[in-house]
């Protein structure tokens, strides 16, 4: 994982964990890597991962099983999605609107390109079938 300078590292790690949850790489009730494991994997200070995990616990994304570690909450994906959605709507969407306005990109053009994007995504996620 490569970190950027425009956001705190613990928040970037929280985004990474959220992505794993949303993509079902870490499904509900699955144990997630320990603080030390994730810190070693991402090559960061364990205190940074601890801060990330505390944030995610407070958001209801993960929960602690005493003596066993942290696990993805049953509603973890919904919590990540709700948090990201709110952040997008409040911070990123206004900048996006500003850009499309400056570039004079129409809503029909955006809609068309979005449908192409969605079709391409669906094609990559669709199971492949082999006929004999």
Image (cartoon, helix red, strand yellow):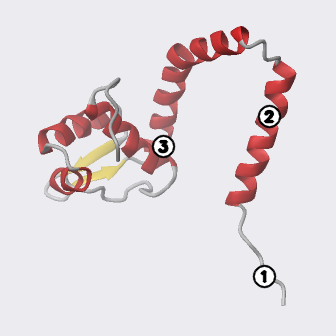
Residue at x-position 14% and y-position 43%: 45
Q: Mark 2, mark 1: which one is toward the viewer?
A: 2
Query: Residue 114's spot in the image, x, y percent?
Result: 76, 34
- What residue is shown with label 2? 113
Q: Mark 1, mark 3: which one is toward the viewer?
A: 1
Spatial CA distance of label 1 from label 3 is 32 Å
- What residue is shown with label 1? 130
Secondary element at image label 2: helix
Label 2 Cα neighbours within 10 Å, binned few <14 / some 14-19 / many ≥20: few
Query: Residue 29's spot in the image, x, y percent?
Result: 38, 56
Figure quadrant of residue 3: top left
Label 1 Cα neighbours within 10 Å, binned few <14 / some 14-19 / many ≥20: few
- Residue 76 or 53: which is nearer the viewer? 53
Residue 76 as seen in the image, left or right of residue 111: left
Spatial CA distance of label 2 from label 3 is 27 Å
- What residue is shown with label 3? 77
Image quarter of the C terminus: bottom right
Query: Residue 75's spot in the image, x, y percent?
Result: 45, 43
Spatial CA distance of label 2 from label 1 is 30 Å
In this orientation, does residue 125 appear? yes
Looking at the image, residue 87 lies above or below residue 118: above
Could you tell me if the residues under marks 2 and 3 are in contact, i.e. CB atoms within 8 Å? Answer: no
Residue 69: image tag: none
N-terminal of the two: label 1 or label 3? 3
Label 3 Cα neighbours within 10 Å, binned few <14 / some 14-19 / many ≥20: many
N-terminal of the two: label 2 or label 3? 3
Secondary element at image label 3: helix
């Amino acid at each position: 994982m490569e970190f950027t300078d425009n956001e705190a590292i613990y928040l970037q790690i929280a985004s990474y964990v959220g992505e794993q949850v949303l993509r079902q790489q870490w499904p509900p009730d699955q144990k997630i890597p320990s603080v030390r494991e994730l810190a070693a994997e991402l090559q960061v200070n364990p205190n940074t991962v601890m801060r990330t995990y505390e944030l995610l616990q407070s958001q209801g994304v993960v929960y602690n099983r005493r003596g066993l570690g942290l696990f993805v909450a049953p509603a973890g994906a919904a919590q990540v999605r709700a948090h990201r959605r709110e952040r997008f709507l409040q911070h990123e969407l206004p900048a996006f609107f500003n850009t499309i306005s400056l570039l004079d990109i129409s809503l029909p053009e955006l809609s068309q390109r979005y449908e192409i994007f969605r079709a391409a995504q669906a094609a990559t996620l669709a199971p492949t079938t082999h006929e004999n």
